[in-house]
Amino acid sequence: MDIESSRSGAHGEPDAAAWVTVEEWGGSSGSALSRTAVLTASASSLASNRFGSRWGRIGSRVLGAFVPEGFPGSVTPDYVPFQMWDTLQGLSTYIRAMLSTQALLGAIGVGEKSATVIGATFQWFLRDLTGMLGGILFAFYQGSNLDSNAKMWRLVADFMNDLGMLMDLLSPLFPSSLIIIMCLGSLSRSFTGVASGATRAALTQHFALANNAADISAKEGSQETLATMSGMGLGMLLAHVTRGHDLVVWVSFLSLTIFHMYANYKAVQSLSLSTLNYERTSILLQYFMEHGEVLTPEQVSKQEHILPFWSSWRKLLRVKLPHELVHLGAKASMLAHSDMLLIAKTRSYYTNANYFLLDKDGSVCIFIHKQAVATDVLKSFVHGLVLARFMQKSKSCHTEAHQWMDEKYNTFISKLKVEGYSTERLLSHSIVWKAHWVYGPLDEKTK
């Protein structure tokens, strides 16, 4: 550049040889941007090049109504497979709902001259009342467990919904027990509403990679609405085609139910949660103690037991997983005199801890201090798992467990954080029973 052109540029005067290019990028986040236009201007002309078709831009707008802003960079990798299977199971649910509702309305007398409005209204009222009361009781007894076992309860919720629909379809076959069957079906679906809503909240937080839980929830609602409308349309068509053909109705219903259960299992199986519950913590700790490394959430998800009835089968077979040997939040009133003496002997291992452990009958009981915080609960559970492991190999299990916690616990937690796990708290049942303790000097007999 010569001196004159430098001076003219400095005074803001246009340079005959000057040009500028501006690119237009569209998208809601840096990871999802795409170039849509390039404008190049010189002193005498303006050139414009556009990329992509108008239909492509319209398609992107339509897709934006059903996926979170910034997709796919704003959600976790397991969002797409989960939503795909979840949409398919929702579609099958609404198709079956038309069949079961048609059967239920026929059972209460819709379309019959002998049926009265007040009778049908009263039966429907009892049905809804039973469902409301059932939802309250279920939330009371299981509300604190839904977050810690979101995968399992998601399957339970849909299974109970299947059971409720089955009750509706059975109602015309047993007219003398109609009200009982209707109420049982409503009760079953009430469990579905509570469990599904609670687990959905936990999964939304998991998917929200960009702290966009509200957007994910809103778009999930749009997806569900689309599945509902499609399912209702197909369901009405199926109900019309199968009217008066009971065998075809049952074959269609059972076939869709089997597909619904399969789609639910695949949806839950695709989840790779980064929160720590009893089983995930146990799997991670066991692998770390054996190999010194931590599994990824994807690897852990393949080892989780998510079938609802798996725990019942294990109880019948008297088989316990490692985390089932540890009882968190034990009651202090259960302590016997021998237990108290054992606690006194091992008190040196828990001097600076807001918990203490008691090995009893092959299990580990964890007593939580009344001033314990969330990180203390997680640490106590890991300590309990370590103690349960050493109980099977050594008589000096408390000593070895204490030594392991001092040397390797912080390393374990650090590696969990590196892999993306949430180590702020342990997803557990509500810890109702806590304790406070004071130690006195030990006499020679108890040492």
Image (tube, grey):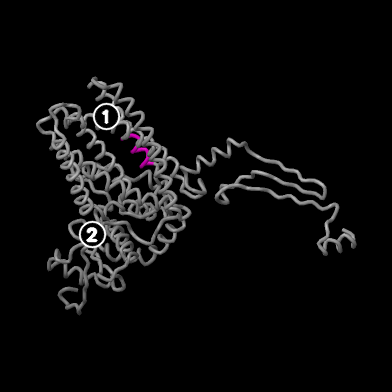
Q: Provide residue 10's location: percent of width, then percent of height.
A: 82, 64
Q: Which amino acid lies under the numbered mark 2 shown in the image of this protein? A: Val
Q: Closer to the camera, 249 or 150?
A: 249
Q: Provide residue 32's location: percent of width, then percent of height.
A: 56, 47
N-terminal-most mark, 2 or 1: 1
Magenta region includes residue 161: no
Q: Is residue 349 visible?
A: no
Q: Is residue 388 visible?
A: yes
Classified by dominant secondary structure, the portion drawn in magenta counts as helix
| Horizontal relation, residue 159 to residue 285: left or right | left
> Is 136 above or below relative to 372?
above
Q: Residue at x 27, y 64 (%)?
A: 398
In the rendering, which numbered label is found on residue 364? 2
Q: Which residue is label 1 attached to?
A: 99
Which segment did they paint magenta? Answer: 261-269
Q: Closer to the camera, 60 or 403?
A: 60
> Is 418 above or below relative to 220?
below
